[in-house]
Every structure is written in structure tokens, then in C-alpha cells.
Image (cartoon, helix red, strand yellow):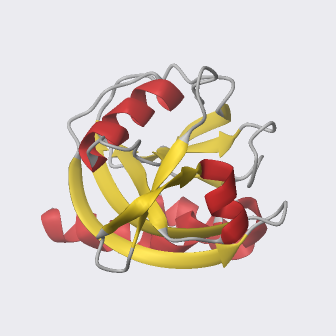
Amino acid sequence: MTNNNKIEKVILVDENDNVLGEMEKMEAHLKGLLHRAISVFIFNSKGEWLIHQRALNKYHSNGLWTNTCCSHPYPAETNIDAANRRLMQEMGMQASLQEIFAFIYKEELDNQLTEHELDRVFIGFSDEKPQPNADEVSNWKYIDFGELKKDVKNNPQNYTVWFKKIYKRVEEHINVKK
């Protein structure tokens, strides 16, 4: 959920995650500047993935399916704190999170915006029922990886660009841990 009392800023970085400064979130997306981001993937005890459909009022990628939650760390906020904050703000739940990898990507989105992110990916496990924020989430579900992989292949237009870039890599990491 956006903090309506102040302008939301992102942390601008170089490819080595050295901080270059701060910028208003929309300006950074309009200019396509590299900034920090987080993506969280939650799994239940059956091994199903918790995914959600972005709310229709989101400023980009609205109505698309994606990982459990994602966002940007605030200036002076750690990546893990941002991941925990957004998991509560978007899905109304908590889990013990662990960072599994980071990657950089740059993709043009709708509304003349560009995602250029150094994205830190976190996983967690929970059987807690989500209590999603309607400003962030229009729908959610737990889904088996085989079914998810098939749907992404058959309906890629229904998923966010960052999700399509990382979901297989997340699955590989989960399989190594089993």
C-alpha cells in the first residue's frame, strides 16, 4: 500500500548495488533507472505456490498474476524489512523469509514505464490464510508448480514480466533444498 502522506522514493543503485541516491518511484520508472526491489514467494506445506492477481488500479501490470508480493525498499530500510513489510501490507500475513538470489532486469511495461530493478528474491513457508489488501490484490490462489508452469506457458500474457523471469529459478532453488 502506498503511503499517501509522503512521496514514495526508491533507492537508485549501480549494478553492484552501490547506492547512487534516491528518486520518486514514478520518476524512476519513467526514466528506467536501476533501483532496488524485492520479490517474495510463499509456499504452503503442500508445496503449492501462493500467487496473486494485481489489483486493477495498480499503476502498471494491473490485473496480471504474479508472486506473493513485491515492492521496493524505502530509503534506509533493509531488503528483508521491506519484504516483511510488503508481505503484511499486500497479503496480511507473516512468514520467516530467506533471500535466495538477486538479479537485474530491464523491461518496458505498460503506461510508458520501465522496470529496471536489482531484485532480491525471498522465499517463505506458511499455511496462514492470506488477508489480502484490496488496493493491492484482486484475487489470489495456491497453485501446484506443474499447473503453474503449464499456465505460464499457455497464457504468458496473464503474468508479470518479472514473475516469468524468475519462477523457474525459484523452483530450482526449492528442489535443491528438498
Residue 52 lies, with reference to residue 15, above or below; the image says above
In the picture as drawn, the residue positioned furthest to the right comes out as: 111
**Residue 40 or residue 83, whichever sits in front:** 83
Res 115 → quadrant: bottom right
- Left or right of 17? Residue 112 is right
- Left or right of 96? Residue 34 is right
Position in image of residue 100 (x %, y %): 23, 63
Position in image of residue 58 (x %, y %): 74, 41
Residue 58 lies, with reference to residue 88, above or below; the image says below
Residue sitting at x 55%, y 61%:
148
Res 31 → quadrant: bottom right
Position in image of residue 83 (x %, y %): 35, 42
**Residue 15 or residue 145, whichever sits in front:** 15
Position in image of residue 98 (x %, y %): 20, 50
Residue sitting at x 44%, y 56%:
37
Using the rendered image of the protein, determine whether residue 171 is visible from the camera's viewpoint: no
Residue sitting at x 38%, y 44%:
75
Using the rendered image of the protein, determine whether residue 93 is visible from the camera's viewpoint: yes
**Residue 55 or residue 8, whichever sits in front:** 8
Rendered-image quadrant of the C terminus: bottom left
In the picture as drawn, the residue positioned furthest to the left comes out as: 177
- Left or right of 59? Residue 160 is left
**Residue 127 or residue 5, whichever sits in front:** 5
Rendered-image quadrant of the N terminus: top right
Residue 137 lies, with reference to residue 157, above or below; the image says above
